Amino acid sequence: MRRFLGFTAVLAIADLLVIIWVAQLIGVVNTIGLLILVAVLGVLVVKAQGLATLRRLVDDVDARRVPAATLADGGLRVAAGILLVVPGFLTDIPGLLLLVPGVRTGVRRYLGYRWTRRFVIVRGDGQAARPLARRALGPPADQ
């Protein structure tokens, strides 16, 4: 938790410094307008992508498919929207990247690989079967 709070504080300070730098380059009014524009874009993206994810989720459930990828993509889209709504240019970069389908797929696979390694699957006889989960998911997309 301390790491997260420390990272958040460093990110906020760095974002503030970048905002000041951009304001010196293009002007204060233009910088504020750009920050508002990106925040509005973030809200619109979260709304549109949330509705699209809900439609895909309903389609997956109707087709009796496990909606794991749909839910993960939806969560990453929400994270992208939140990063776009937070004022600052440094948080906008990963927010915009998460809107690209290929980047989102790579992040989803990587997170799935990381999280699967953390969980222990217990077989019926009580023995841990962690390697089964790793084989089922495969390597992360960036390897």
Image: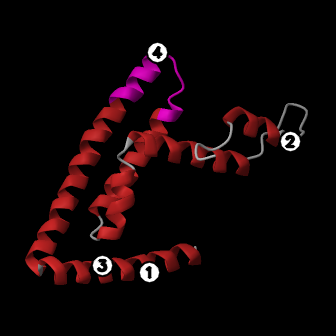
Which residue is denoted by mark 3 in the rendering? 18
| Residue highlighted by disc 4 | 63
Q: Main secondary structure of the magenta part?
A: helix
Image side of residue 102 versus residue 25, left or right: right
Which comes before the other along the chain, label 1 or label 4?
1
Q: CA distance from mark 1 to mark 2?
A: 39 Å
Q: Earlier in the sequence, mark 1 or mark 3?
A: 1
Classed neighbour count for the residue bearing mark 3: other residues with Cα under 10 Å, few (<14), some (14–19), many (≥20): some
* In this picture, residue 27 sits left or right of residue 80: left
Q: Amino acid at mark 2?
A: Ala
Alpha carbon separation for disc pair 3 and 2 = 48 Å
Give the mark nearer the N terminus: 4 vs 2: 4
Name which quarter of the figure residue 55 lies in: top left
Nearer-N-terminus badge (1/2): 1
Q: Tell me the number on the disc at residue 128.
A: 2
Span colored in magenta? 55-69
Which label lies toward us, 1 or 4?
1
Asked which secondary structure carries label 3, the reply is helix
Q: Quadrant of the N terminus?
A: bottom right
Q: Is residue 90 magenta?
A: no
